[in-house]
Image (cartoon, helix red, strand yellow):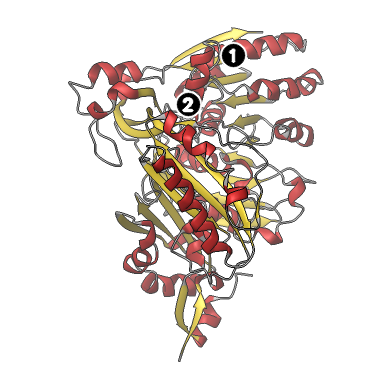
Amino acid sequence: MTEMKTLRSIAYARSGDKGNSANVGIIAFNPEGFSFLKNYLTVARVKEYFAPLNPSDVLRYELPNLYAFNFILEEALGGGGSQSLRIDSQGKALGQALLEMPIEISLEEWEKCSRRKK
Amino acid sequence: MNEIIRIGNAQGFWGDSPGAAARMVHLEPELDYLTLDYLAELSLSIMASQREKDPQLGYARDFIEVIHSLIPHWNQGSRVKVVTNAGGLNPYGCAQACVKALQQGKTRPMKIGIVDGDNVIEILKSDARNVDYRNSQTHESLENIVDQLTTANAYVGARPIVQALLEGADIVITGRVADPSLTVGPCAAHFGWSWNDFNALAGATIAGHLIECGNQVTGGMSTNWTSVFDPVNIGYPIVEVKHDGSCVVTKPGYTGGRVTEETVKEQLLYEIGDPSSYLSPDVTVSFLSLSVKQESKDRVCVSGATGKPPPPTLKVSASYHNGYKTEGMLTIFGLDAQIKARKVGEIILEKVRLSGFVLHRTLIECLGCNDSVSGVVPSNGQSKECVLRVSVADPRKEALEVFAKEIAPLVTSGPQGVVGYASGRPKIRPVFGYWPCLINRELIKPQVQLIQS
């Protein structure tokens, strides 16, 4: 049986800009969370989630040593820096936005993934 | 030689807390180096506008206030050295202002190292027709914007900083250098690393990356911010770097904030690209071999960075004039606030159109209704309060002046409950396009000059 949780319950995040592209770092609380997200938090899923921002492409890099992923949302900032008309012209809110993503996960697995490292 | 070198950062960007440097030196009298980072991607274009008005400017004037605040510490015996990119477009002018401040403050004679040679605007302009410079993000040719270029600066590495320090500089003032190089420079000078000690250089680059944004590694910006201890007194970061390039990230005692594996990992991931090859002018760094371990409270050890030779090119941040922009805000309170706010925004833009201007770009945002990340996180539309933000850009300044005058009238002609119009008409600002590209590093010849106070 799967449950709906949010990404926030198993990971933390940080985001910022490089010109007109943004990066969102996602860090799982623990190795179980990293394994789950390796399969779950795919490029396709992240691309669909951020579709309203119109990224030209999404790249995913894995950092297994940190239980982390780095997502690049290419050309997603409406011009970026000084050109973008958006209040978040530098992508600072994107980490919080991605942590709101609903995730479908079994209760048993969620209990493992949501444990913070002691 | 000390086995570790302690480097603090007390300025993560131009506009960061002005009292942080003196507070850091007060709390950490034995600190070896203080780094101050003033240059984000587009800071130099702002400095270019300031220099247009006064050729003596073009650097971060706030830095001179920081020097004034450090003078009492130097006069009481502090030996802390300062490494900063506050020089912006005019490191020499910045150094002269710094000398003047030191003389007024009657400090011991101090040497100031000036690092220059990052400005490549003339190279780009004269080569634009022979060399195919392409925007690293859009791949568009430089020829399209070369006539509007305002600044173009290459990210110089740590070598000229090392040279200035080895020649005895107490303060090093640079223009554009890669942010982590402000930390790599003192480490390489202290430990006498060769430029082939790639793992050590990689470690110091990581240390520099971790502290370059100030409080972002000590609890600021963290996901778990609400549980950060004493955020009023948040401490700026310190790295204690060893001869092998590994470091401990920490902060002064008796300060707020925190340094944990979480805060360090978050900052490691901040504004990076491919973690297997983080490019800097000094070394290409892999983050994939890093280990991050809490050693004790507010002390996190970061080790295992691996490095490879840097690329044969340097990154250039260029900027160009691209018209004007402005934005106006009104707060709408009451039933259906979001619907009313959007309507008010549309009316403002329609009035501008009726005055004869079709604005080049416009955006209506309903803040308070999840529009900071518009369309990504759904809003329930039930909020009784909404901040309307209308932003516009156009090559014609006069079109934006018309826009700026059409916002206030909605206080009386719009819905009931429009508040928050006290700051007057919005200011119209120039837009600078950001234009990153690569340049052959052989073309960049950084110069180091020392002057004495």
Residue B354: x %, y % from top left: 40, 42
- Taking the image as shown, residue B338 lies to the left or right of residue B312, namely right
Q: Residues within 10 Å of mark 2 (few under 14, many from 20)?
A: many
Instruction: Tell me whether circle 1 and circle 2 mark residues in contact (CB < 8 Å).
Output: no
B106 shown above or below B35 = above
> With B401 as the anchor, is B216 left or right in this view?
right
In the image, which disc is placed on residue B95?
1
SS for callout 2: helix
| Residue holding disc 2 | B44
Q: CA distance from mark 1 to mark 2?
A: 17 Å
Considering only vertical position in the picture, is B376 above or below B196?
below
Of B375 and A92, nearer the camera is B375
Q: Chain of mark 2?
A: B
Q: Please give the name of the residue rendered at 38% of the width and 54% of the height, measured from the top-left corner.
A: A72
Q: Chain of mark 1?
A: B
Q: Amino acid at mark 2?
A: Leu
Q: Is residue B202 above or below residue A102?
A: above
Q: Residue at x 47, y 35 (%)?
A: B402
Q: Is residue B416 left or right of residue B57?
A: right
* Camera-side residue of A97 and B255: A97
